[in-house]
Amino acid sequence: MRMLVKLAGVTFGDCQLNLRLYTPDQELHLHRVSDNEFDANAVSVRSGNMHLGWVPKIVAAEIGPMMDRGKVYHVRFAKFNESKGAKTIGMNVIITDEETKEKMEEDQINEEPHI
């Protein structure tokens, strides 16, 4: 499994500040948040202790329960979403399962997100 997704919720909390502090050489990881009041399948994307955004609900509905059962997923930076003159910034990430990570070649960062 390999998905390119646009992070959700990047305008809430400290996400904008954290996205501006993040550099693509920093490691990303997925953090399961089963007690999220808005989405029982919620999966956060983090770099260290910085929350950068959320995996979109439709994707979290698939991978959240699998993470609960012990399946391992990996996440890596794809690109920033920033329009000229815009005050907000977003991020696309690539999510893969363990099997795909082993086989993955260098990705095209200009492809469109699945979600």
Image (tube, rainbow, N blue to C red):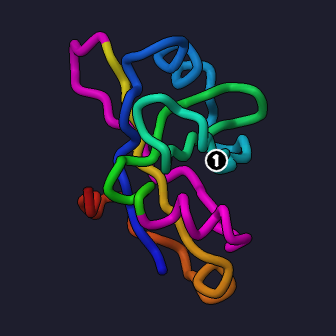
Name the foreground residue: 109 vs 2: 2
Question: Which percent across, then down, holds residue 72?
Answer: 70, 70
Question: Which percent across, then down, holds residue 58?
Answer: 32, 56
Name the foreground residue: 77 vs 96: 96
Q: Residue at x 33, y 17 (%)?
A: 88
Question: Which residues are the magenta region?
Answer: 62-87
Question: Which percent across, then down, holds residue 68?
Answer: 66, 62
Q: Residues within 10 Å of mark 1 (few under 14, many from 20)?
A: some
Q: Is residue 67 magenta?
A: yes
Question: Which percent across, then down, holds residue 25?
Answer: 69, 44
Number of marks in the image? Answer: 1
Could you tell me which quadrant the C terminus lies in? bottom left
Name the foreground residue: 71 vs 88: 71
Q: Residue at x 60, y 43 (%)?
A: 34
* Amino acid, disc 1: Arg
Q: Residue at x 54, y 50 (%)?
A: 77
Place residue 49 in its image quadrant: top right
The local secondary structure at tag 1 comes to strand
Q: Which residue is mark 1?
A: 32
Q: Is residue 62 above or below residue 85?
A: below
In the displayed structure image, the side of residue 59 where residue 44 appears, left or right = right
Q: Is residue 35 above or below residue 58?
A: above
In the displayed structure image, the side of residue 12 where residue 33 appears, left or right = right
Q: Is residue 89 above or below residue 41?
A: above
Q: Residue at x 62, y 89 (%)?
A: 103
Q: Is residue 76 magenta?
A: yes
In the displayed structure image, the side of residue 54 where residue 104 appears, left or right = right
